[in-house]
Structures are given as structure tokens and as C-alpha cells.
Amino acid sequence: MTTAEMITAFNVNYDIVNLEGPGYEDTEILVLLNQAQSIEVLKEVSKRNWTVLSNLLVNEQGTLAAGLNYAYTKLFTPAQEYIGYISSKSKVTRANYRPITTAGGEWIENLPIEKELSGKYLTNTINQPILLQPRVFEDTLKKITVIYDKNTTFAGANDFYLEYVRKPADIATGVNSEVNIILHDRIVNTAVSLAKKVFNPNESGNSVQTDMMINKTV
């Protein structure tokens, strides 16, 4: 649907459930549609339903930057606004155990970990891990942190490949929703549900899940 068609569909559906009560201006409807778009996209990200999100998938190759105040860490900042990690690869060489000696390095898959477990993989005096595959986790400011071991050396240029879900552009007058068309009806229906809560307090008690999804988009 175009933006105009989404606004029309919202008005039709809202009039049906609101029994000709107070309506919304187009600018207000756009706010509700954008909240609903964020909710529906995040639902699919949580389910890892990449087929439905195909319009928002990004494959980005770049060079890792210096890491945190720890040995053997690097950082990557996606070029576009990032809302969901899919997978990543690193281009490396390895010395000693399981050596990789190919000129320029080889691509290997990174293993995602939880941020709270990152300390287990750091190299220091009392911990000497062997990480055949670098570990990655989502960090602050939408960055990806990479942890590797002392036997691993990154190629140094275009040595990181990230696959992720980017934030869709806001729906606006003359700017249609970027998400897959299969989500358009759901976006309209969710926007109507959000609108119903404003004038019908009884609706609020049935909308805990919706509120949780809104909070994640703030």
C-alpha cells in the first residue's frame, strides 16, 4: 500500500471500531503508523523471520576499528541504523594451532555471544583462550564488538562482513512504507489498536504486549 492507501485503510478500520467517535488528522495517523511499523518489524526480528524482512536486510563489508580497553578486541559500526544482528564473518590469518596462512587471510564465521559473558573470552594473564572463531556481541551505540585470540590476525582492510536488519524509514506524506507489503495490513491494524487505546481505556488492559514493543523502539 502507498501512504495514502494506508491512511485510507486506517480511517475505514478505525471508523468501524470507533462507532463514528473522534477521528484523527493525517499527521496523527502517520505517528500511529510509524509506531505500528516499528512494532511489527521488531516482532519479525525477534522471530528471525528474514523472508518477511527482506526489504530491510543489509550485507555490509568494512574494516574493523580499534577495540575496547582490552587486548584482542575490535569494533565495527554499521553504516545504517541497526536494529537486529543476523550473522557476521571475519577475514583472518592464524598462527600456531589451526593455522591459516592463505595470503590476505580467509573468511570464517563469527560466533555470537551474550554481552554479559564477554569477559570469559578475554586474553589476560589468567585466561588464555583459543578462539578458532572470533566471538561477537552487540554493544553500546549500535556497535558490534569482536573478541579474538592471540593467534588470530585480521586482514586489516575490509576484514569484517556483517548481515543485519536496518531501521526502516519513517512513513510520511509521499514516502511509502519500506517494509514488505505482506506487513502493510498488519501495520494498519496495529495502528488502529493503538488509536483505540486513546479513547477507550478498556483497550489498554488488553495491550500489554503492544506496550512492550513500543518501549523497545524508544
Image (cartoon, helix red, strand yellow):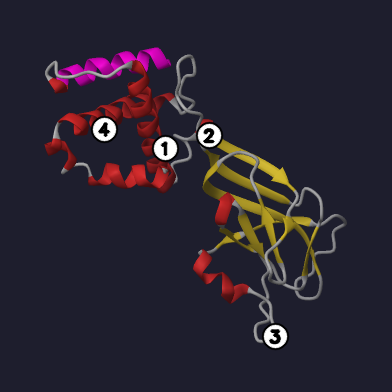
Residue tagged by mark 4? 194
The stretch of residues the image draws in magenta is: 1-16
How far is the residue under mark 1 from the one under mark 3?
44 Å
Residue tagged by mark 2? 56
Q: Can you tell which of label 4 and label 3 is closer to the viewer?
A: 4
Q: Can you tell which of label 4 and label 2 is closer to the viewer?
A: 4
**Image quadrant for the N terminus?**
top left
Are the residues tagged 4 and 2 within 8 Å (C-beta)? no
Are the residues tagged 1 and 2 within 8 Å (C-beta)? yes
- Label 1: how many residues lie within 10 Å, few (<14), some (14-19) or many (20+)? many
Give the residue at x 47% y 19%. Answer: 176
- Label 4: how many residues lie within 10 Å, few (<14), some (14-19) or many (20+)? many
Question: Tag 2 or tag 4, which sits nearer the N-term?
Answer: 2
Residue tagged by mark 3? 125
How far is the residue under mark 4 from the one under mark 1?
16 Å
Question: Tag 2 or tag 1, which sits nearer the N-term?
Answer: 1
Residue tagged by mark 1? 41
Q: Can you tell which of label 3 and label 2 is closer to the viewer?
A: 3
How far is the residue under mark 1 from the one under mark 2?
9 Å
From the top left corner, tell me how far across and down residue 184 is, in percent.
37, 25
For mark 2, give the secondary structure: helix
Q: Looking at the image, is 83 positioned above or below residue 193?
A: below
Name the residue furthest right: 103
Circle 4: residue type: Leu
